[in-house]
Image (spheres, grey):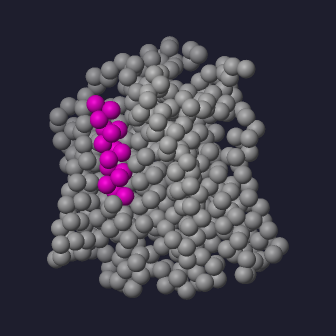
Amino acid sequence: MSGANLFGICGAALVGLGLYGLITNPEPLRKILAFNLLGTGVFLIFGLISRRAAAAGFPGDPVPQAMVITAIVVAFAATALAVALVLRLLEQTGRATLGADNPVSEIGNP
Amino acid sequence: MSSWFFADAGLVLLVLAIGASTIFARKAFDAAIAFVVYGLLLAIAWVRLSAIDVALTEAAIGGGMTGTLLLGAVARLRSAEPDNIRLGLPVRLATGFCCALVAAGLAGTLLLLPEAIPTLAPAAMENLVHTGLGNPVAGVLFAYRALDTLLEKVVLLLALLGVWSLAPNNAWNGIPGLRLYERPNSTLTFLAQILPPVGIVVGIYMCWVGANAPGGAFQGGTILAAMWLLVIIARLENAPSTGQLWLRIGLVLGPAVFLAAGLAGLVSANGFLAYPPGYAKPFIVTIEFALTISIAVVLAMLAAGPSKQVQQE
C-alpha cells in the first residue's frame, strides 16, 4: 500500500466522520463544521486520484487539483452564507437551533 | 515501506484525531480551534500528495479563512440559549454504524480502483507550451477549464449577495458587523502594523509567481484579504460600508475583466474564453491580477458578514 492510498483511506474515514457529525450534532454551527469535514474528505479522495497519475511519470494530475482548488473556494463561500444564516436566525429568534419546538410566533418579528 | 510511509501514517492518524475532535468536542469553541489546526495539518497532507497549489489554498482558505469565520460565529452564538436536545445512544450507535459503512465502502472502492489510470496529465502537459505558463494547475484553471473558474467567481459574488441580503432593513448599505476588539490590545495592534506590509508583498508575489510555480490568484487574494481583516479587527482602519462604490467596483473587477477577455476571444481567437495564439500569457496574467483584487475583496466581505450598523457621517 502506498502513501497516497493512505491519504485516500483517510479521506474516506473523514467522510464517515463528517456524515456522523452532520446527523447527530443538534447545533447548526457544528453541522456546518461537520459538513466542511465531510468536504475535505472528498477533496482528499481527489488527491489520491490525482496522485495516481504519478505512476505515468508526472508529479500529479493537474485537472483534479484544479477542481479541488475551485471546490475549496466554493466551500468557503457556502460556509460563509450558512454561518450568516445561523447568526440571522439567532438575531430573529434568540436561539440558534433546528429543533421543531421553536416558538413560531417569534419568527418574523424584526 | 520507507520511513516516509510511517511519516504519512502518523500524519493521517493526526489528521483523523483532530478531525474527530472537531466532531466530538463538547464546546463549539474547541471545535472551531481544532478545525484551524485540522486545516493546517491537511495542508501538509496535500504537500505529501505533491499538490502544492492545493496545500496553499487549503491552508489559507480551508484553515485560516473558515477558521476566522467559525470563531467569529462561535463568539456571537454564546448568547444563544443552550440546546439540550441530544440524540439517544441507540440512535447515535445506529448512525455511527451506517456512517462507518459509508466510509468502509468508499475506502474499499479506493483500494480496488482499476489498474488503468484515466488521466489527462499528459494532454495537459503537452499543450502547456501554447499557454506560455509553467504551472499546469494554472493552465487548467485559466486555459483548459477557464469557464469553471469564471463561474466560480460568479458563485462567490452570489454567496456575497446572499450574505448581504441577511442584513436587517435599517442597516442596509451599512458597515459589516465584524467583531472588533474592544480593548486596544497592544500585541494585536503591533501584529496588525508589522504583518500587512510583508503580507501584501507575499500576496502579490504569489499571484505573479502562480503562472510558473505553485500559487495564483486564489492564494494571493486570500492573503490580501487576511491582511485587510487583520487591520480592521485591530481597529487600525474601519470596515468599509457595503454601499461604497470602490468596494462594489473591486468586487466585480475580476469577473468583468475575465468576461471581457473571454468575449475578446470570440473576435481575436476561435471561441469564447479562447486566447489569441502567442498572447495567452499576457491575457492570463492580466485576468489573474484583476481576479486577485476581486477575490481579496469578496473573501474579506464574506468573512466580515452582513452589515450591522448604518455608517455615521
Q: Quadrant of residue B306?
A: top right
Image position of B110 (left or right of B89):
right
Q: Residue at x 52, y 50 (%)?
A: B199
Q: Position of residue A15 (x, y in %)?
A: 32, 54
Q: Residue at x 28, y 48 (%)?
A: B19
Q: Position of residue B139 (x, y in %)?
A: 58, 73
The magenta stretch spans which residues?
B27-43
Image position of B167 (left or right of B4):
right
Image position of B288 (left or right of B65):
right
Instruction: State which quarter of the image contains the N terminus of chain B.
Output: bottom left
Instruction: State which quarter of the image contains the C terminus of chain B.
Output: top right
Q: Residue at x 60, y 76 (%)?
A: B133
Q: Position of residue B308 (x, y in %)?
A: 59, 24
In this orientation, does residue B76 appear?
Answer: yes
Vertical placement of B180 versus A3: above or below? Answer: above
- Viewer-proximal residue among A83 and B54: B54
Q: Position of residue B74 (x, y in %)?
A: 39, 30
Image position of B194 (left or right of B29):
right
Residue B36 counted in the magenta span: yes
